[in-house]
Image (cartoon, rainbow, N blue to C red):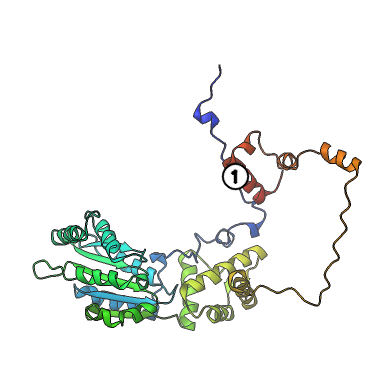
Amino acid sequence: MSSTSPEQDRPTEIQPTLPSEAPGARMHSEYYGLREHPFQMTPNARLFFPSSVHRRALAHLTYGLAQREGFIVVTGEVGAGKTTLIERLCNELDPAGFVIARISTTLISGDDVLRMVADAFGAPSEGTKSALLRGITHVLRHSTRRHLLIIDEAQGLPLSALEELRMLSNVTYSGHPPLQTILMGQPQLRRILASPDLDQLRQRVLASYHLSGLTLEETQAYVLHRLRAVGWEGRPVWGSDSLDVVYRHTDGIPRRINRLCARALLSGALEGAEEITAEMVEMTAVELDEDLGGPIPEPRRDRPRPTPARRVPPSAATRKATAASPDPLDLVLRRFEVPPGAAERPACLFGWVTSVFFRGPR
């Protein structure tokens, strides 16, 4: 009786390859000789651009932390750079002096917020509310480091959760509060904090700043800053007129800039272009709007409807020929030279088909 080892039975992994002779099929960063993607959507503190609004926001954060108590509030539109700003701040803080915890899920109750805070700071996160508070208080009072709690998307917190955070700010040790909280959120967070029910929390806000969009000049500098940070040496060329179009379509919001410029670079690579022109950026912006946010064209009402064809039953000869025809799936598998047994293994079949889409059949 023969047996097979797990290694022999494991499906072969197919790695898709991109044809080197087709520059449009390569990543635009490779085509233009860049070390990495300059306009990635994920916040990257290394690519932080110190615009005037971000410098002022960082100054407010630094001032708030120097007070060693209370709340700091940072608001801004989606994609304005709040997370990148916080990443930059955290990179500058001494790990020997701070314990930093971040909470991003905010559509939760007040008790769940306490559980998440407890878990983030290493306190027991099970039990009653009083047990949670005792555990968090014990951790805060018996640490040699300051504790910084960062709440992202804080506009999603219910009033009860914000009140629980305020109660945590009452904890003191040797006359000093060991916990500070940064609330980050969209502009509606400011309206929520203006509620009469949150008057006590509002009085504990020591620094607050709203991130607005970049100016035209800063938008141009932002794009060039991110390109230079990944090894750009002038290829492709970005003219001032093309950067003007970027600003017009993004209002200076960094995430919108990244999205538009990334697609413009991709279009340039696909076309083998050595310059990103204003027309190219304009067309890319229109494509992005149509991808997700554009209206769906309605059918023309003046176009005559086609007359449905009369269904004719197949003849005996046609039915016989159809029965004798090979299975279409078998034809596809043979056409693309799928290895034997791959069709029974979804992971292997998917990898092979993916590679075919990139390189074409042999």
In the picture, the quarter occupied by the C terminus is: top right
**Residue 56: horizontal and vertical position, in percent?**
33, 80
| In front of the other: 234 or 284 | 284
Outermost residue toward the left in this view: 174
| In front of the other: 78 or 243 | 78
| In front of the other: 74 or 187 | 187
Q: Is residue 141 left or right of residue 322?
A: left
In the picture, the quarter occupied by the N terminus is: top right
Q: Which residue is mark 1?
A: 351
Q: Quadrant of residue 107?
A: bottom left
**Residue 311: horizontal and vertical position, in percent?**
86, 55
**Residue 245: horizontal and vertical position, in percent?**
57, 80
State whether residue 100 is above or below residue 352: below
Q: How many marks?
A: 1
| In front of the other: 258 or 164 | 164
Q: Is residue 56 visible?
A: no
**Residue 238: horizontal and vertical position, in percent?**
57, 74
Q: Which secondary structure, mark 1?
A: helix
How crowded pointer 1 is (Cα within 10 Å; few <14, some 14-19, many 20+) is rated as some
State whether residue 258 is above or below residue 51: above
Q: Residue at x 82, y 38 (%)?
A: 323
Outermost residue toward the top in this view: 1
Q: Is residue 353 visible?
A: yes
Q: Residue at x 56, y 19 (%)?
A: 2
Q: Quadrant of residue 9?
A: top right
Q: Is residue 8 left or right of residue 333?
A: left
Tell me the kind of residue under disc 1: Gly
